[in-house]
Amino acid sequence: MAAIATLGSHCALQVLKGARDEGLRSVLVCERARESLYRRFAFIDEIIPVESFSEILADGAAAAALESSGAVLVPHGTLVAQMSKADVESIRAPVFGNRHILEWESDRAMKERLMREAGLPTPPAVAGPAEISGMTIAKRHGAAGGKGYFVSSSPAEYEKKRARLVADGVIGEGEELYLQEYIPGVLAYLQYFYSPLSGTLEFFGVDSRHESDIDGLARIPADAQVSSSLTPSFTVIANSAMVLRESLLPRVYEMGESFVEASARLVRPGMNGPFCIEGVYDDEARFTAFEFSARIVAGTNIYMGGSPYTALVYDEPMSMGRRIAREVRLAESSSRLDDVTT
Ligand code: AMP
């Protein structure tokens, strides 16, 4: 019987509960500091305790335990945030989906290339601070969760805000930031699952994010905003559920499918498993994508009991974690585990 493993953070509870629901064994790689949290949940069959997640890498202290658990490792945002390309490649356990595409999520240039290949409209990049003329968002590389991002409208404002964040230790002195036009509108994070076993794309749900402290700033009157010296950041704190106007769905599927096709061309074996296209709807209901995540996103945690969209396809509660476990179970029973892992 196959097993599912993941790192103890981000969406580990959903992933391991999904494994249990599908009758698979669940294995958690858990930092000792968090063990007491995860021991509360009876669906976790095995805990591999570590001081740091890096112990699962090639010659790390926990690599052998993970390998001998026989589990498929489900990558999530914590793995992407903490591990380099070489780290991810060195993991000896099979990784669910396409481990090679995770680098395309972390590297801004590669990310843009894949989004262009998929034909997704993206916000224009701003070449450097000197070129800032309209509202521009400065972003950090990797899965930073929005921390340290800031908006400015002129080179001088950029330098002032950047210097403040460096002084506060939020961003590093020489840290390179990526500049992009800021698009106002309704933010939406589109969650998908692509099955290489059936060759079908499923739309799993959509969420919005609550970001601190930009959301808080929007709640105070304009005069107080103007006089505030705060440089608001975009740190993700929570997610909440959304449903889209039904007329937007054809484009949602179209974007997901072109992303899957583009990934298959650029980074074999393509975008297998869960992914998310992240962006904003403007006043014409046009979607501009500013990001993608090439693995399960934490926004799927909202739908542990299924989403409005999975309810249309499954006659049982279907979370993204459970869908992953189902794919592993089906792959194992048809001797196709190699098709769903790398
Ligand atoms: P990201 O790391 O790209 O997902 O961005 C984190 C947050 O920054 C998003 O959830 C948005 O609130 C905001 N954001 C990023 N890029 C843009 C953009 N081009 N226009 C508007 N908001 C953005």
Image (tube, rainbow, N blue to C red):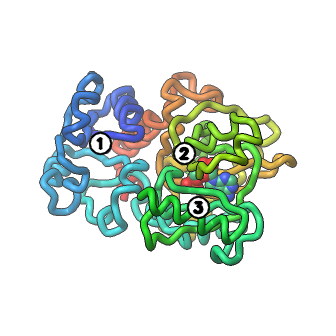
Image point (53%, 50%), residue name: 275
The residue identified by callout 2 is: 193
Residue 165 in percent (x, y) is at 50, 59
**In percent of the image, x 82 and y 46: which residue is there?**
285
Determine crowd level at label 2: few under 14, some 14-19, many 20+ residues with C-alpha closer than 10 A: many
Determine the secondary structure under disc 3. Answer: helix
Front position in the image: 32 or 225: 225
- Residue denoted by label 1: 5
Q: Quadrant of residue 120?
A: bottom right
C-alpha gap between disc 2 and disc 1: 19 Å
**Image quarter in which the C terminus is found:** bottom left
Q: How many marks?
A: 3
Q: Earlier in the sequence, mark 2 or mark 3?
A: 3
Name the residue type under label 1: Ala
- Is 220 situated left or right of 99 in this image? right
Residue at the front extreme?
Answer: 227
Is residue 330 something that shows in the picture?
no
Pick whichever of labels 3 and 1 is earlier in the sequence: 1
User: Is there any visible trace of residue 176 in the rendered image?
Assistant: yes
Q: Is residue 284 above or below residue 299?
A: below
Q: Earlier in the sequence, mark 2 or mark 1?
A: 1
Instruction: Find disc 3 in the rendering and name its residue.
Output: 161
Disc 2 residue type (three-letter): Phe
Decide which of 53, 139 is in the foreground and name it.
139
At which x and y percent is residue 75?
38, 50
- Front position among marks 2 and 1: 1
Rendered view: 39 above or below 8? above
* Residue type highlighted by circle 3: Lys
Count residues near mark 3 (Cα–Cα under 10 Å), then give few for <14, some for 14-19, many for 20+: some
Mark 3 and ligand 1: say if the CB distance to the nearest ligand atom is below 8 Å: no
Kindly state the secondary structure of the residue where label 2 is placed.
Answer: strand
Q: Are marks 2 and 3 in contact (CB under 8 Å)?
A: no
